[in-house]
Amino acid sequence: MTDMLLHNGWELVVGLEVHVELATKTKLFSGSPNRFGDEPNTNIDPVTLGLPGALPVLNQHAVELAMRIGIALNCTVQASTFHRKNYFYPDMPKAYQISQYDQPLNVNGFLMLPGGVRIGVERAHLEEDTGKSTHIGGATGRIHGSEYSLIDFNRAGVPLVEIVSRPDIRTSEQARQYVTELRAILLAVGASDAKMEEGSMRVDANVSVRKPGAELGTRCEIKNVNSVRAVGRAIDYEARRQIDMIENGDRVRQETRHWDDGEGRTHTLRVKEDADDYRYFLEPDLVPLAPSAKWIQTVKDNMPPLPAARRAHLSAITGASEESEAVIVVVERGQDDYIHEVVAAGGDAGKALVFVQQAFADETAQPRVPAKDIAALTVMERDGKITSTQSKTLLAEIVANGGGDAVALAAAKGFEALDNSAAEKMVDDVIAAQPEAWAKYCAGEEKAMGALVGAIMKLSQGKADGKVVTAILQARRTA
Amino acid sequence: MASLPTTAAEIAAAVSSGSVTASEVLEQHLAAITARETDVHAFNLITTDTARQHASRIDADVAAGKPVGVLAGVPLALKDNMCTHGVETTCSSRILQGWKPPYDATVVQRLRDAGAIMVGKTNLDEFAMGSSTENSAFGPTKNPLDLSRVPGGSSGGSAAAVAAGFSAVSLGSDTGGSIRQPAALCGVVGVKPTYGLVSRYGLVAFASSLDQIGPFANTVYDAALVTEVIAGHDSMDSTSIPQPAPNLRSAVSQGVARMRIGRVTDLPGGAEPEVMQRLEDAFEVLAAAGAEIVDVTLPSIEYALTAYYLIAPAEASSNLARYDGVRYGLRAPASEVNAMYGATRAAGFGDEVKRRIMLGTYALSAGYFDAYYGKALKVRRLIADDFDRAYTQVDAILTPTSPMVAFPFGDKVEDPMAMYLCDVYTIPSNLAGHPAMSVPFGTGAHKLPVGIQIMAPALGEIPMFRVAGVLEDAARGLS
């Protein structure tokens, strides 16, 4: 598609590697708690610290969550093995990471973007996280040049799934959609809390450019991309950098680059020639991981509905588009079930969607307000018993109090909506009182409408419905 | 002092019945240590005080009529590569000098629960790499039968402790023959169980796919008794076989009538003539006892040594990478982290360990992996296939344990290849994961003991101990 091409006809090619921390109680190979934010070096044990003689034992719940991810991404779940990836770093206790190498647990899947674009998923494999280093002193925050380093091994051994997409992504917008949709899936299947800001979901982007139909260009891997917004910015920057290089007659070097969100640019972290030789070999302390067909089937049978299906369902009952922000956001927060409850309590689905999107933005779980209270409010507004402005006021109060009877609250506040004939009369009164504004509005100056509506609302003492008033004004103008 | 029982079985029976006290037995062994340890140097650490406390507790339990374990009051020595809670565990390496594990190895826990009393941690070739105990950072152990000669290795301290009467039994670890070869050279029984029969949790790893813990004892029955105590599934070791310990004690006296015993017609040469003569004697004894001697071939074992010296160093290079000076053990000061790694490891490891780390790192490196490590794994498979074929014809196979009797200090330590050849007959069982043991059977050159190796298929400990019992009976007649 030509509208996806960058300037001068360059095509962007992106593959994403996403690491997610699994929401297990304990670590991948030991019984220490997997918990973010605890005092440093409290969730440790001989296995976590790589003490001599300690041996890994695979956490079966981590395997199950990894399988859920694989199944949600349409992967084949297969017999797999663990390898050792050897390299020295102070926060790597054993000086090797246990990871899946040539036989990962999940292979050959795909993720459908909300717009229907299919992005291949090459693999989704299990591995352990490293400890977390903090380098003190020095300008860069890196180990070199620092005065000393602190290591927190609480994160060491936390289970990760690395999800590797195929290089099927062609725009930075698709990359953002991929990360957003993947995050929604991870939340839906309960595999991870997927918080990019806390590092429980980490995105690396492999970026290259080429002319359409040409061989793949040399790619750079961009690290430290810590938000959905940064995914798009980093890719856009990097694509531009590579195009400029090529158009200036230079060649792109294969390297790992660091995204600096403050500066809005990438920096060289290391070039390919400096890459470690990881000396992978089969981990002799573990046996192959071959989930039985029965186990895989049990996981499949217990899969919760995925975001795409839930968006479709919510769209069908509310009338809002599957791609509307309200539908996407409410499903991502897991509040679509609540909307179904509101509807079951007799509420208006469309209005419930709007209320929930607006009123429960801080809540990622089920809102703590009885569904019947929200249902009653949606009905009052739908039936014109109160205006949308009044309903907003009542909604805020009901949410703040954790519930409330909308009818009683409206009565206590003296809220009632004007009926249409009264509203029409007020509109005509204001048109008569403000002929200049009316003339401007008729001439197409939309700004003039604001003055007219404001005057009408004032006249009605807030009881007029702004939408109704606007509709009457428009009807008068076209008449 | 009245004559005290000497075998583990007799000691446990006498202590349990109250006819002697654990403290009396312990003092007798401590007296032997006092008399000869300065010459022999079997121990890195002697735990006199805790041993006396433990013996007193057992005596108090017996006096109070409480149940005591099957090894009640049996003095035990542990190879210093098994973790003991709060007790220094060094692997005879400067890099771990002073390190006190915060946990017990599974075997240590099981032996203590059975009432065994740890008298000390025994010397070994550094990280179990060697066949003479000359590679210890703390000086060699001497053969109690001839102080000018080596005790074998790497578990030389544990073999010498039993041979010198410092402990009734001891534990060693066997990666390529490190229990069986010193057992042969010191004239005691040594057992390498089936890989996975005894938990490796808390055994400081040398080569994880080959390491296995086993006992030294003065009698076959004692070896069976200790093996039973330490064998059986352990959920802390993923490679532990999920079944209970076999009943081995009853096998010792079952005889070999109608058993088929293999004679390897293509056995690698180089053994001393007296050693080969003892092997022939052993076949005669077994034939006379009703066994059928059957010729078998193991064509691939001529490559076993080569394959072993790629696989074991490869795994060691990874297992020993954790000794980086960051979290425990030696740290050599340096200005930045990579220099600190280098300085620490240069100062902390001896020559043989460094040699194997370099060998193993090379064998796993990109571009060399297939030609070295990959090919060695194929040889390992071929050797296992050879054994599988042979074990369709026979129940056990007899070979010498060591090509030579105990050799003088300095004889081979400057020539790694000559030293590596000490393990030519023992390595194949490790590569196959099969059980094998050495039983003293007469003498060779210089009237020094010769050990006969009995090999059996995976979990073939029962036929192996049947053969051992018959050879032991016959050997008593020889002396």
Image (spheres, coloured by chain):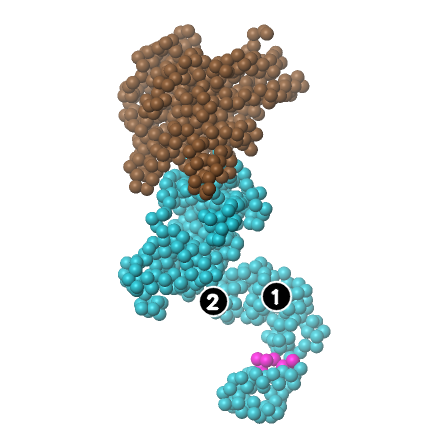
Chain colours: A cyan, B brown
- Depth check: give the residue in front, A31 or B165: B165
Q: Are marks 2 and 1 on the same chain?
A: yes
Q: Does dot 1 land on a helix, a strand or a loop?
A: loop
Q: Nearer the viewer, mark 2 or mark 1?
A: 2
Amino acid type, label 1: Ala
Magenta-colored span: A462-469
Which quarter of the figure has residue B313?
A: top left
Left or right of B22, for residue B162: left
- Chain letter of the residue beneath label 2 in the structure image: A
Left or right of B60, for residue B186: left
Q: Does dot 2 land on a helix, a strand or a loop?
A: loop
- Chain letter of the residue beneath label 1 in the structure image: A
Q: Which residue extends farthest front?
A: B335
Q: Is residue B166 visible?
A: yes
The quadrant in which the N terminus of chain A is found is: bottom left
| Residue A472 % position (x, y) | 56, 85
| Residue B163 % position (x, y) | 47, 14
Q: Which residue in the protein does label 2 denote?
A: A322
